[in-house]
Image (spheres, grey):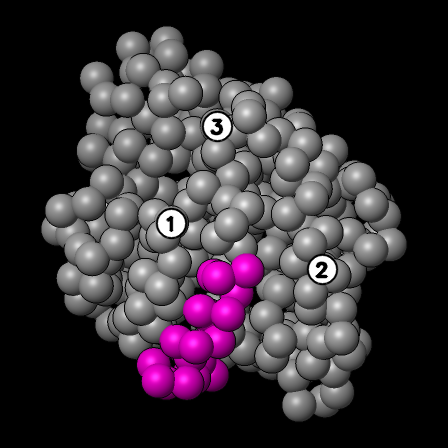
Amino acid sequence: MAEITILDGGMGQELLKRSGDAPTPLWSTGVMLDRPGLVAEVHQAYAQAGAKVATTNTYAIHRDRLQGGDSNHYAGDGVDMPDMEDQFQALMDAALTEADAVRGTCRIAGSIGPLKASYRADLHPDEATATPIYAEVAKLLAPRVDVLLFETIPSVEAARACLAAGRQTDKPVWLSFTVDDEDGSKLRSGEPLVEAAKVAAGADAALANCSTPEAMLAALDALATSGRPYGAYANGFSTLTKSFVKGGATASVLKTREDLTPEVYARHALTWADHGATILGGCCEVGPDHISELVARLKAAGHTLAA
């Protein structure tokens, strides 16, 4: 049996559940200014569930995502963004302060999401343009986190930019890829995940995230070729349709899977552990109850959990 590192679960959807508010562009980012303490509450809930890595609420804190107007959209969904670019530093500081609530209990992973929009490899800047943008965020996070977690990477070129940016700091770099929900061996760009795994060979861990649980076994087989520790944290959405990934549909159309109970999710995750995954957690719509059940099932199966 392996030693497993337990990540937390999704932040944005959990914030929405606790607030009762409707999803709007960048709401889970702006909430740190409007409702201080709510993000810390979510961090604490995951720590109590057994997570040993707390992921900062910095996924969408990029200058390009914070720019307002009709030229910028959340996830390419056509919804105009509020202009929050002047809040860039304040939001970064707020997110890191909220994570301090579990510092000492959990390692802190500085989340860095994709540029422009989630899942949209076609919108992502080229490597030369993207690398310094990622590096700015990485350097701001590095002094106050234990690891840099580049999340929902949609393409090989984006992975190269993330790795190059992360290596400009002294912190471990984890690369996490979003894969096709119907074929986990492919990135959202359509490229083979094994090509991204070659990039991840230069990182400290290779992961798959924000895709269906059913896609993860194929993803893990590809990530194993990196030669680095690997793992998965799936989402609890119904399949992200091609129309959503390509844009033209709003985030409000995403539906929670009613069948993905904590017990069902934990069963999926145990198969990932059987596939050699040593880093496990959850993404959107996977909450503290899912993590608690995962921890219990891993222990019952004889796995050791990393402190």
Q: Which mark is residue 100?
A: none
* Stretch of the chain drawn in magenta: 121-140
Kind of residue at badge 1: Lys
Q: Decide which of tag 1 and tag 2 comes sooner along the chain.
A: 2
On whether residue 118 falls in the magenta region, the answer is: no
Q: Nearer the viewer, mark 1 or mark 2?
A: 1
Q: Nearer the viewer, residue 214 or 64?
A: 64
Q: Decide which of tag 2 and tag 3 comes sooner along the chain.
A: 3
Q: Secondary structure at mark 2?
A: helix
Label 1 Cα neighbours within 10 Å, binned few <14 / some 14-19 / many ≥20: some
Q: Decide which of tag 1 and tag 3 comes sooner along the chain.
A: 3
Confirm whether residue 223 shows in the render: yes
Name the residue that disc number 3 marks. Answer: 52
On whether residue 127 falls in the magenta region, the answer is: yes
Gap in angstroms between the C-alphas marked 1 and 3: 17 Å
Q: Secondary structure at mark 1?
A: loop
